[in-house]
Image (cartoon, rainbow, N blue to C red):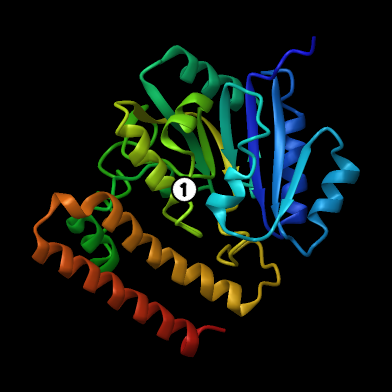
């Protein structure tokens, strides 16, 4: 009888062939830490990513489908995973030795933890702020989007080397349990890109489980590779895809607010929030159409 892996690693890929290869190579070096399987879910890449996985990583399970966004792309792997723990991992990451075993051990030792992430280090050496976030309540969102003050949103009031409970972690390294995902319904598929990790954290916390930022170990994160936002990776991305990603990020704000925060505030506050989001969306569209290169 073949033993099932403890951990299932799901990597959603879209036109990041070289980065995906580097990510998979980094995982190869971690095989002795914990038993795991790797599932690559490819969103109709046109850069030969699927062929590369078949040729160079025959032990990886490859799923191919249309580009239906982050949530549906990751959820595609739901029927195929075998591990009791699930790690959603971005293809523009490199996993260091010790990261998988340390984070998995912490999750197993703390039954009240529903999900956790490690420290994410950018190419500049800075820490990726999105690794730990507060939920975007009206006041927090207003300060970040319109006044450029994200200190509260990104937990900059708490030292980045402290293990801490947070509202939300990033989908670039999102470790959880299969039974938790099955209970909350995995990623909500009304999101195309952005917001789905916040929403999943919201659903997990509603189960009275903690979300933990665990900075004792780290991975490297290029960030923005599949959207063209990275300063260190400039793939050829169609303007239509760039615009769709930019618009979906703002649309995600409205979806998250209406779904999760709307009942908590007076109607006048809700109207002002939605009006602000739609104004921001129009500004972003105008800026892209007339000032982007």
Where disc 1 sits, the SS reads: loop
Q: Which residue corresponds to mark 1? A: 128
Quadrant in the picture for the N terminus: top right
User: What is the residue that sits farthest to the bottom in this orientation?
Assistant: 290
Residue at the (39%, 66%) spot, across then down:
251
**Residue 87 locus on image (x, y percent):** 57, 33
- Left or right: residue 187 versus residue 20 is left
In front of the other: 158 or 254 = 254
Residue at the (49%, 24%) spot, across then down:
179
Residue 7 can be seen in this image: yes
**Residue 84 locus on image (x, y percent):** 58, 21
Quadrant in the picture for the C terminus: bottom right
Residue 124 can be seen in this image: no
Write down the quadrant of residue 266 in the picture. bottom left
In front of the other: 122 or 28 = 28
Tell how many labels.
1
Residue at the (38%, 39%) spot, across then down:
201
């Amino acid at each position: 009888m073949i033993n099932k892996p403890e951990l299932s690693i799901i990597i959603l890929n879209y036109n990041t062939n070289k980065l995906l290869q580097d990510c998979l190579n980094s995982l190869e070096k971690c095989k002795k830490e914990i038993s795991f399987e790797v599932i690559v879910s490819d969103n109709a890449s046109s850069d030969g990513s699927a062929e590369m996985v078949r040729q160079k990583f025959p032990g990886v399970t490859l799923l191919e489908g249309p580009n239906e966004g982050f949530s549906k792309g990751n959820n595609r792997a739901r029927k195929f995973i075998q591990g009791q723990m699930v790690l959603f991992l971005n293809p523009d990451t490199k996993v260091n030795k010790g990261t998988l075993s340390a984070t998995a051990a912490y999750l197993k030792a703390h039954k009240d933890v529903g999900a956790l992430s490690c420290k994410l280090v950018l190419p500049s050496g800075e820490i990726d702020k999105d690794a730990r976030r507060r939920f975007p309540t009206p006041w927090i969102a207003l300060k970040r989007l319109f006044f450029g003050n994200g200190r509260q949103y990104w937990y900059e009031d708490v030292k980045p080397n402290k293990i801490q409970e947070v509202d939300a972690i990033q989908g670039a390294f999102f470790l959880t349990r299969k039974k938790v995902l099955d209970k909350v319904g995995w990623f909500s598929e009304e999101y195309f890109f952005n917001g789905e990790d916040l929403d999943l954290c919201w659903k997990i916390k509603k189960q009275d489980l903690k979300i933990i930022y665990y900075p004792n170990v780290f991975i490297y994160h290029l960030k923005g590779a599949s959207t063209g936002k990275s300063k260190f990776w400039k793939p050829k991305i169609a303007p239509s895809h760039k615009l769709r990603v930019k618009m979906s990020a703002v649309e995600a704000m409205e979806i998250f607010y209406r779904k999760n925060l709307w009942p908590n505030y007076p109607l006048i506050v809700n109207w002002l929030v939605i009006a602000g989001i739609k104004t921001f969306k129009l500004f972003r569209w105008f800026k892209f159409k007339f000032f982007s290169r």
